[in-house]
Amino acid sequence: MRTWRSVSWVVIAAAGLPACLQADDDSTGEPVETVDSDSPELASIASSALTSGVFDVGVIPDFGLSCPAGSDEIVIRMDDEDDGNASTRTGFVGKTNAGETSTATRFYFCKVDGTLFKPFSTAANAAEQRDDYAVLKLGTTCPAGTQEFSRHFDNEDSDNRNFATGVISPNVVNQDTTLNFCLFRYAATGVATMSAFPNLGSGFRYGVFGPSDFNRGALAFGTIRSDDEDSGNTSTYTVPTDALSAAKRIIEPDSSVSHGATLLRVIRAR
């Protein structure tokens, strides 16, 4: 068995120099195993460092649960319309609105590695929208096999009490809220698929956004309705044209509430 000792490394960016230099202080005098700058081990470490956080996404923890080890919890609280408030939550919504009034919408998300998630369908089955699902975008880039879309929520104008905790970028919370989503539809050539949602930790139950007829083993279904501002409502929906139909089956402007609302459909994944 090889024994590894702690080694300090200095990363050198200049051309023509080795990628890493070993610190020359080893007070024990024992042999120290070095890693060549072209080795698979170092390449793996470098790749992990470069992509850390890039593809992060948010999943919805189940009620009463904390995020799994190594995962940060973020909170996004939207102050919904005061007059004749029609905000609702039905069925499975996980931790959503825990500790909140019924007339506001408070999201809880766990920030996890988005590369663990993949489409269920191949391009040959792209028309099957019952396989589609979405997660909150929390990195700089949506994972492979996704399309990005967003919903801008025009929140309550009077005595607005929106807030957020944790690093929520690229999402924005001020007087209003803009949430960005990564929509998994189908795998293009060279993109892998999956047959089940990933296990993110022992005993950790979570949800994602998905249609009410999701076809890949949802354990429960639910809906979150946020009643958006009535006066001069400016809620907007930004989505690629070819993904509009699929996205609206999951998160859509809700015309059943006068002046504007948003309906978000949730499925329990694990």
Image (cartoon, rainbow, N blue to C red):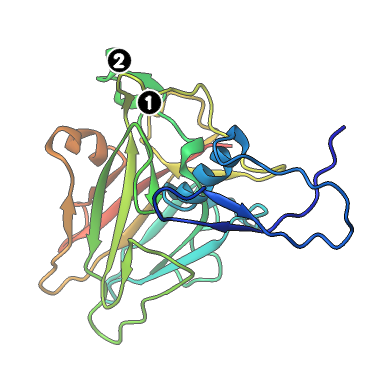
What is the x, y in percent for residue 106? 44, 66
10 Å crowding of disc 2: few (<14), some (14-19), many (20+): few
Amino acid, disc 2:
Asn
Q: What residue is drawn where x is 17% and y is 62%?
A: 235
Q: Which mark is residue 125?
A: 2
Which residue, as the protein is rendered here, is positioned at the far bottom? 159
Q: Is 103 on the left or on the right of 113, as rendered?
A: left
The residue that disc 1 covers is 131
8 shown above or below 158: above
10 Å crowding of disc 1: few (<14), some (14-19), many (20+): many
Q: What residue is drawn where x is 17% and y is 51%?
A: 238
Q: Is 200 on the left or on the right of 162, as rendered?
A: right
- Camera-side residue of 224 and 166: 166
156 shown above or below 227: below
What is the x, y in percent for residue 16? 42, 48
Q: Quadrant of the N terminus?
A: top right
Circle nearer the viewer, 2 or 1: 2
**Going from the N terminus, do you reach mark 2 or mark 1 first?**
2
Amino acid, disc 1:
Asp
Q: What residue is drawn where x is 10% and y is 72%?
A: 232
Looking at the rendering, which quadrant does residue 205 occupy? top right
Q: Which mark is residue 173?
A: none
- Camera-side residue of 251 and 89: 251
What is the x, y in percent for residue 113? 51, 45
Q: What residue is drawn where x is 32% and y is 29%?
A: 185
Q: Is 24 on the left or on the right of 4, as rendered?
A: left
What is the x, y in percent for residue 108? 50, 60
Say if residue 23 shows up in the picture. Answer: yes
